[in-house]
Image (cartoon, rainbow, N blue to C red):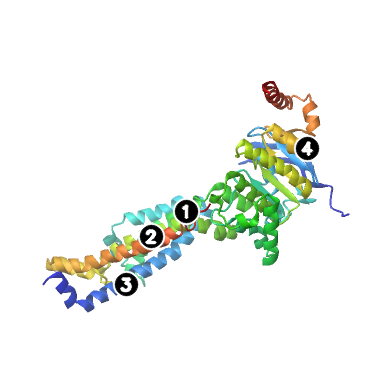
Amino acid sequence: MNDSPAAAIEFVNVTYRINGNRTLISDLNLSIHRGETLMLLGRSGSGKTTTLKLINRLLAQSEGHVFVDGRSTSEWDVIQLRRHIGYAIQEAGLFPHYTVEDNVALVPRLERWDVARIAVRVREVLQLVGLPCDEFSRRYPDELSGGQRQRVGLARALAADPQILLMDEPFGALDPITRAELQHEFLELKKSLSKTIVFVTHDVAEALMLGDRIALMDSGKLKGIFSPAEFLRSKDEAVEPYVTAFRATQQILNSGA
Amino acid sequence: MSLPGFFVAHKHEVLTLMGEHLWLVGVSMLLAVAIGVPLGILLSRRPALKSLILGTNNIMQTIPSLALFGLLLPVPWIGARADRLAILALTLYALLPVVRNTYTGIAGVDAPVREAAIGMGLTSRQLLWHVELPLASNVIVAGIRTATVITVGVATIAAAIGAGGLGEFIFRGLAMVDNNVILAGAIPAALMALCADFVLGLIQRSLVRRPARTHH
């Protein structure tokens, strides 16, 4: 179909040090396939968010290379690179002085799409994340619930139709019911969109449910990459605590039922 | 002579001095904003300069105004005319609140908002115009408001070096030991400060995020 490389994102011997001494990521090698959802799972401080930020160059590695669509991120024009990649974060980071519509339309406007195309696209992506455009487009972020804000954040990340989507604990701050709802919709969404998604989470259940593959990180090192089924079967000592915790929760739930 | 009588009798002089006063304050504030806002933006980009610039400004504020007018007298071109000198001194006084509030306003933008903006590919300039300045605008206007009120007051001292303004009446009244003459300068100056405070307050309130709206 095209001659683009199989990996949408590739880390080659990547090390990231802060202020030249403390190592947050060491010698990371990771290949993220086109169209897959890769979960970066780990505890806080494991380096998963740092890894994510190396992709859109919010951080720059100290050693090694990160390739996006076959091109090293240091060769990309950084603004072009970021507009080429959707980015959704935990607090959504919506602009409080912009309406929902203006928030979602931001990147297409910066990319100078024509007005009619932007209007169509805003309606389309809001629909996609379950927010009827007529009801929500004129609202401001402080008139939305946490779940709705997160949906707008996702719509904004999708607006310019990027082929790669980075999500940093996007459902982390939501109440359990809203979170389950959004996770469920995310599953539907990723099926229909076929984008490359890198998703940071510390929640095993979320990783197992949403990921095609799970990359487990600990103290700045990649401990392994697993499919959800492999992850549950793994005897790897880095994986076991997660699986044990996950099973314990399930057992409590089952015995209560 | 009664105070109202004085105003009627000296109508033209009152208006002239008010005009001069307004001019001194207006030009100084325009300069203070034109210099102070970019300086505040520079600080937000180069925090290392913070102690230098805010420190210098702070010292400026501690110099008694009368002394500052005197100290600037030998400066070439500036010292040649009283109004230039007064405007420079007033600008220096007005600078600190404008610089500090611009910096504080920009620094106060929520971290996730800034991170999302940068992550989506806004350039530094787009970040400034689309995000930081709009969100900081009410804090910046609050700084301009403080500075304006201070400047209206300090500008009365400009009369001591012959730069005119409502201070003329105040100094003359002091020399004549005539309270009415002092009040003829002090009352319009106070009213001017109140008006500036009120108008800038309205602007500031209109900038708080967005007009309040109810929604159901």
Q: Nearer the viewer, residue A104 or B61?
A: A104
The residue indicated by pointer 4 is: A213
- Quarter of the figure with the N terminus of chain B: bottom left
Q: Label 1: which residue? A: B105
State the CA–CA distance, disc 4 to disc 1: 43 Å
User: Can you see residue A35?
Assistant: yes
Residue at 34 percent across and 56 percent down: it is B61
Residue B169 located left or right of residue A70: left
Q: Secondary structure at mark 1?
A: helix
| For residue A71, above or below residue B28 | above
- Amino acid identity at mark 3: Asp
**Left or right: where does residue A57 sit relative to residue B31?**
right
**Chain of the residue that carries numbered disc 2 in the rendered image:** B
The residue located at (74%, 27%) in the rendering is A239
**Which residue is outermost to the top?**
A255
Q: Are marks 4 and 1 on the same chain?
A: no
Left or right side of A190 for B13: left
Q: Amino acid at mark 2?
A: Gly
Q: CA distance from mark 4 to mark 3?
A: 73 Å
Whether marks 2 and 3 lie on the same chain: yes
Label 1 vs label 2, nearer the camera: 2
| Label 3 element class | helix
Q: Residue A24, how many percent across, how many down?
A: 66, 37
Residue A62 - label: none
From the image, tell me which residue sits under label 3: B83
Q: What is the secondary structure assignment of the residue under circle 4?
A: strand
SS at mark 2?
helix
For the residues beneath circles 3 and 1, the answer to whether they share a chain is yes
User: What x and y, as percent, mark residue A224?
Assistant: 77, 32
Q: Are marks 1 and 2 in contact (CB under 8 Å)?
A: no
Q: Which mark is residue B201?
A: 2
